[in-house]
Every structure is written in C-alpha cells, then in structure tokens.
Amino acid sequence: MMRGAALQGDQKILETRGLTLRFGGVEALNGLSFFITPHQIASIIGPNGAGKTTLLNAITGVYPPHTGEIFFRGTLISRLKPFQIAALGINRTFQQAQLFSNMSVLENVMVGMHPRTEAGFLGGVFHPPGERKEEKKIREKAESLLDLFGLLPKADWMPGHLSIAEQKRLEISRAMANEPELLLLDEPVAGLNIRETEALGDLIIRLKERGQTIILVEHNMHLVMEVSDWLIVLHHGSKIGEGRPEEMQKDSRVVEAYLGT
Amino acid sequence: MGKKNKIYLLIYALAIFTLPAILQNNYHLMVLNIAALNIVVVIGLNLLMGYAGQISLGHAAFFGLGAYLSAIFTTTYGFPLWPTMIMAMVFTGIIANAIGIPTLKLEGHYLVMATLGFNVIVYIVMVQLDAVTGGPSGFAGIPRLQIGNFAFDSDRRVYYLLWAVSIVVLFLSLNLIHSRVGRAMAALSHNEIAAKCAGVDTESYKVKIFVISAVLASLAGSLYAHYITFISPGTFSFFYSIQVVTMILVGGMGSLWGSAFGAILLTILPEVLHAVKEYNVLIYGLILMVVLVFFPRGLFPGIAEAFGKRRREVLSDSRKQLALEKRA
C-alpha cells in the first residue's frame, strides 16, 4: 500500500497503534492501526457496527481504548480526557447534531472557542477590560464563522428552530471555532436531502481547500468518493482495506462487502 | 450581560429601595429581609441546578455553617464581624470542595445523596454539640451587623444592607452567566459530552460552581445570624434545603430573575396564607402544584414567554416546518 513518497513521522497528523475497545463481550475495535496525513480528507467506511463511530469516540477520548495508543502529532493522547484532546486541536461533530439547545446559534459557536480563550470565574463575574476585549473577539470570530457557513442571518435563533441541514452546519462551525488541526465529521449528511447533501459536500471540499485535515465517517458513498483522498475500510472493528478511493473501488473484498455494485 | 438586563436590574433596584417608604410595618420589612437572604441562597443554588445540571439537598447545611461559624467565632471568641464572615465563607467553600470532588467526578446525581447526608450530619452536630452550639435551645446574643460605628439595629436599616447584598449577588451572577464561563456552564448542563468535546473541563466547572453556590449560602447564613441575633438548629434542617429547591422550581430553573421572583414569592406566600389559618399548608401545596403543572419550566420563564410575542411566532414557524418535514 503506497501513499506517495515515503512518509516521515511528522507527516502523520494522527496515528493509532493496535487500538482495542470492548463493550462487554463485543470487540468494537480490534487491534486497529492506521495513520492520517495532514491537509487531506480520510474517510472511514464500513457497514453498521463496523466500529466507525466508536473509533471517533476513542480518538476524542469519549471512550478511551482498552489497549493500544493514539498519537496526535507525535503526542500520546489516548490517556487524555476529551477536553484536553479538544484543547490540543481535535474537534468533532456527532451523528445526531449535539447542539446546546438552551443557547442561541451564535452562543453555540462561541462555546466552540472555549479552549482558545481564557477568562475565568473572576473575569466572568467582574467583566474587567481584558475580559470585555476577549469577549468581543470571541463574538466577532463566531460571527465571521457563521457568515462563512451561511448562518449569520440566524445568529439569534435557537438551534431547535433550524433545519437539520442548518443544525449540521452549525455543529461544524462550532467545531471549526477552535481552529482544529483535525476535524472529525460523523455522518454529516445523514438525514439530508440530495441538494443539502451536495451543499454540505461543497462545504467539506471548501474546508479542505483551506488546508483542513478531516476524518469523515459517512455512509453516502457518492459523497465519500467525491471528497476523499484516502479510504479506510472497517469491518467488525478491524481494518480490512485502505487506499485511494479509486483503488478501493476496485478492491474485490471491499466492493463485494461494502460498496455494493 | 446585555442592555435589557441592566435596565431591568435598575428598575428592580429602584423598586426595592423605594419600598420601605411605603411599608411602615416592621414585620413586613422583616419578611422582606428574609426574602433578600433567600434570594442569595437560591441564586447560588440555581447556578448549580440550572447551569451545572446538579442538585444539592444540603444548602441548609451550608447556610447553617455560615450562621454558626460566624455566631460562634464572633460571640464566644470575640472575633471581628466581617473578617469572620469571610472566614466562614472560605471554610464552607473548602468543605464543599471536599464533598464535590469525589461526587461530581461520577456521572449522575451522586451529589444529591452526598449533600443530603451532609445536611443530616451538620444538623446532628448542631443539636448534639451543645457546649459550642447551644444545642437544640439555640445560640443567642450574636452581635448585630455593624459598619464602623453605624449599627444595623432596626429592620429598616438592615433592609437596605441585605437588599444591597442581594442585588449585588444578582448583578454579579447575571454577569457570570453572560460570560465565557457562563456559556461553558450552560453547555455542560445541557449536553455534557458535546461540552467536553468542545473543550470544556466539565468536572472542574461542576466542582467550582458547587463551591460558589455553597459560599453564597454561607454568606446568607452569616448575615442571617447577625441580623436575627439568635439561631437554632431547626432553621437549618433538611426542610430548608427542600424549600430553596422549591423556590428554584417555582421561579424557573436556569433563570436568575426567576430565582429572585421565586424566593420573594415563596417567602411572602406562607405569611399571607396565615390568613386562612389551618388551611395554609393545603393552599400552599395547591399553589405549588398549579404552578408546576401549568408552568413546568417555572413561573418566571412561563410568564415571560406568554408576553414574548416574537418568540411565539418563531415557535409556530418551526412547528409548521416540522409538520412539513413529517409530510415529506
């Protein structure tokens, strides 16, 4: 399996080694090893129950792996807590958009900037000039992100009043607020119609053009083939194949089992 | 915290400080003074319940710690008034921290049980340690509140002090929830996993909010002791913990204005209900039931929503959209 020129360590933005995660007797991840290169879109595919979402949960620290390691830019992160991993620059979205429905669209994005800002309890209680300045910066950045994602006119809305497609975009903008080096998208087009899917695909490509590294978990093969630079195919928590999309399309095992005809 | 809140706060403060001019009866002022203290406790607890998604059934104990610590150290040992109150707050904070660290690490409502148990322990200590606390018959002769040579020796004088404290606490808490920390708190109360993945250290925030809410209860307790000048364990029993939680539920969880509203309402209501004598508990319960059935999110948000026309329109729009999506 060649991936262009020989890769040096620093070209692996994320690497997993022998990742295993069990739920009761079920091995959700089974000795999984792979790596991701920067500024590319790597898609994780596989049938339901293959361990795709579990993998994202392991990377973000939601379910720490039982054995194996995860390295992010050479740093071991598999023992860290989710908030520490987010602070290092890995942000994610969820299969079902997990928005904070008790605050406005704008505030949702503002929360995304939490690791990159500093004001603590005292700052919050007394609003000293430094805090006001930071707050202004947070607001402006959130507004510019909403503008980029076409949600600025609805900045004051509550997320529950947005369409599913808008909620998905809002979740991505909240993740982007932290300027993550690695963005994890968990089925971003699930539940969207064809036109919304296309629009979100365009958005993902635009993010990549800005140099964003993305791990995409997605069932929509059309989208996966269109945007991915690299595919990793999972089955029962193990990797059964990886390569460029066009190679994977020809890989008999993968085609048979997961891509259909 | 937004222009609107500042204007509301100004109107609120003006109304509060002109009220004594109308009220001539000292008893009325005393009820309102107690309401001011309840507001401080309830706002602190609402930060925990409404913004950290955790429930404490031990706030009477923190209120009591503030009261007893201040009373014992100023009366028995002659410590100065204000530093002792601060010391009581620090001590209460340390205890809350010790309770919060192990219990808030666990997901779920372990804090409820821990605080409930703590309340019972503190109550028993107050009753049994009579050499220090005066036991069941209470602790008397606590020095009055005083700043320099100015003694707060009438209900009217105390009114201005307690309400100033209560308004400042409301103001600072409103500031807090409209800040980076406030957003993080709101996020973690609503969706802990998403908050964690957005980079919020949810465990540490929960502990800190719990400590803040305990410290506010302690402050209110100290002020109470020096205002009434007599305390007994009964005031700090589990019943008071339930009462403050009820004030939050009636006022509206997560609404600080609702806390002020709920605390005032439920402090005054039992006094008003004295008019119906033996039926007062019945009617009190009935009112609570009606409020919770018809305003499940609390009276204050419920009423605010009924007046918020724009919000309703947005809601109906989204319902239409939902109906369309269902049809599709």
Image: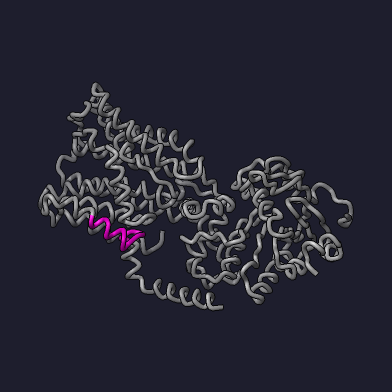
Q: Residue at x 63, y 74 (%)?
A: A193
Residue B322 % position (x, y): 50, 74
Magenta stretch: includes residue B294: yes
Q: Residue at x 76, y 45 (%)?
A: A31
Residue B168 % position (x, y): 32, 50
- Left or right: residue A220 compared with residue A167: right
Examine the image and state in which quarter residue B92 appears: top left
Q: Quadrant of the C terminus of chain B?
A: bottom right
- Left or right: residue B227 compared with residue A240: left
**Residue A204 seen by the camera:** yes
Residue A166 % position (x, y): 57, 70
Q: Residue at x 40, y 53 (%)?
A: B175
Q: Quadrant of the N terminus of chain B?
A: bottom left
Q: Main secondary structure of the magenta part?
A: helix
Which residue is at the front of the view, B133 or B162? B133
Examine the image and state in which quarter residue A186 appears: bottom right
Q: Residue at x 76, y 50 (%)?
A: A238
Which residue is at the front of the view, A169 or A119? A169
Magenta stretch: includes residue B290: yes
> In the image, is residue A9 above or below residue B118?
below
Residue B9 % position (x, y): 31, 58
Q: Give the magenta range.
A: B286-300
> In the image, is residue B39 above or below residue A166?
above
- Left or right: residue B197 compared with residue B227: right
